[in-house]
Amino acid sequence: MTSLLLVEDHPIVAKTLSRILEQKGNLHVAAVASTAEEALTKIPAVNPDLALVDVSLPKMSGIELAAVLHEKFPGLPCLILTGHVSQHYVQLSLEAGARGYVIKDNVMGILEGIQHVLKGEIYISEELRRA
């Protein structure tokens, strides 16, 4: 089963999203981190297949975390999770090394994005492809 590290600073969103990913996506949320710094300490112990990272985090942003993950854990794909429907953020995320960019309120898009990124593809939410 595919394991994920979810980096999300809002506990209710993290809990809800974890449940949905496990029930609908047949995925295992191995750990949840509320900050980028916490995520970096959990990765070696958890060894996830994918990091699902909120773009808006305290201190270090999700985009900054994507860059650190790309450098320190090059085999760990990172998918940015966001409420920001903005081409600018998509561009910054991909330049930082993220493998995709999905919108928080589109559960099917998140699940689809995870599958594409795990296959080595780059995935951008449909809402942004139309923008």
Image: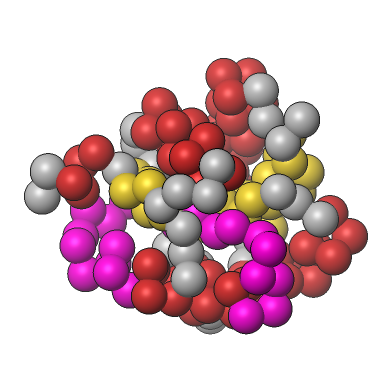
Task: Pick the quarter of the image with the N terminus.
Answer: top right
Which quadrant of the figure has residue 87?
bottom left
Q: Is residue 78 above or below residue 66?
A: above
Percent across and percent down for residue 120 are 53, 49
Percent across and percent down for residue 118 are 58, 44
Number of labelled discs?
0
Instruction: Please state if 65 lies on the left or on the right of 128 as rendered.
Output: right
Image point (48%, 71%), residue name: 97
Percent across and percent down for residue 101 are 38, 53
Residue 8 at least partly seen: no
Image point (52%, 35%), residue name: 115
Colouring rule applied to residues: secondary structure
Instruction: Please state if 107 lies on the left or on the right of 1 as rendered.
Output: left
Residue nearer the viewer, 72 or 59: 72
Which quadrant of the figure has residue 65?
bottom right
Residue range corresponding to the magenta coloring: 71-92
In the rendered image, residue 115 lying in the magenta stretch gets the answer no
Residue nearer the viewer, 13 or 53: 53
Q: Is residue 114 above or below residue 100?
A: above
Q: Is residue 63 above or below residue 105?
A: below
Residue 41 at least partly seen: yes
Residue nearer the viewer, 55 or 47: 47
| Residue reaching furthest to the left | 131
Instruction: Please state if 34 lies on the left or on the right of 101 as rendered.
Output: right
Image point (53%, 77%), residue name: 67
| Residue reaching furthest to the top | 23
| Residue reaching furthest to the right | 45
Image point (58%, 24%), residue name: 25
Instruction: Please state if 91 lies on the left or on the right of 112 as rendered.
Output: left
In the rendered image, residue 76 lying in the magenta stretch gets the answer yes
